[in-house]
Amino acid sequence: MKELLIGSCFLDDSPLQREWLDLQLRFIRATTKEFDHVIVASHEVTGGAFADDSLVIHPLEKFTDLGGSRAHQQSLNILADFFERKKEEYKYFLFLDCDAFPIRKNWLSILTGKMPHHEVAAIVRPENLEQRLHASVLFAKPEALKNIQFPATEIGYNFAGEMEKDINVSYYQARRNLVLSLLRSNKLEYHPVGCGVYFDMFYHHSNGSGCKYNEELSQKYWDHAVEPIEDLHNFREMLMDDPNMFVKKLAGWSPEEYAIV
């Protein structure tokens, strides 16, 4: 049995998405001893091989007509189905957004050691006023895969007292005793919501597809402290220019344990 299957959701093979994929794979290779990698691309892949060492899943039905969250939702469900069919072949499974990746060496043994009775581990983002388990980083044991689907349903009231409705892992949303929540752990903050390090183990940029920063509710919540911004592109450029220093400063707590790419 192999150790780990990682699946990533991308839009297409545009230059920006290729840049994120390159960075993601560099960090995965620097932190993870044994893994296979698969990509679900929700839009057209035109430029030949997207990633030489990664399997690319092309949806049977093109969903270029689906925007934003809907395309992401279908990509996640395709990935969940693929993982379910591979559950006898791997010990562990990891869902990643295009702009998320592990940053800490030996992360897998640390994380599994923290999960004696948990079936999944997932980012939670109270800094974005959310209650839900976030699929940008979702780690699963094989027994969890039969339960993982990604509906877009009401979760309950968020931390601003408004109804939260978005893509979620509904089975585990209702069974939090089976979930290890991965909390934001930044030592340095560039932004209250973007550029997040979670559990001193994973980075998630937020809005890595190149779209405008669209967390409207949390923008209004934080606007007395931080001037609302249109996008997180400047932070992306800082990350891409020197990913080692950016991550090391941002995460901060364990500098000798972070990957060098």
Image (cartoon, rainbow, N blue to C red):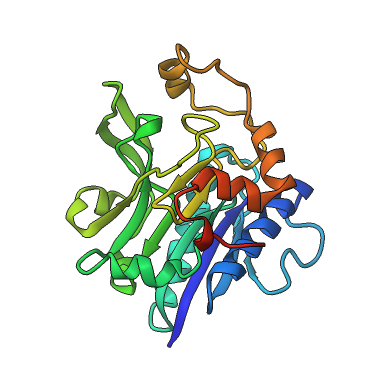
Quadrant of the image occupied by residue 207: top right
Quadrant of the image occupied by residue 55: bottom right
- In front here: 237 or 162? 237
Left or right for 193, reference 199: right
- In front here: 234 or 19? 234
Residue 251: x and y in percent read 50, 47
Residue in the picture at 44% in, 66% down: 107
Q: Residue furthest right?
A: 47
Residue in the picture at 29% in, 37% down: 131
The answer to whether residue 17 of the structure is visible from this angle is: yes
Tell me the quadrant of the picture where the C terminus can be found: bottom right
Residue in the picture at 58% in, 29% down: 213
Residue 64: x and y in percent read 65, 45
Residue 211: x and y in percent read 64, 33
Q: Is residue 84 above or below residue 239?
A: below
Tell me the quadrant of the picture where the N terminus can be found: bottom left
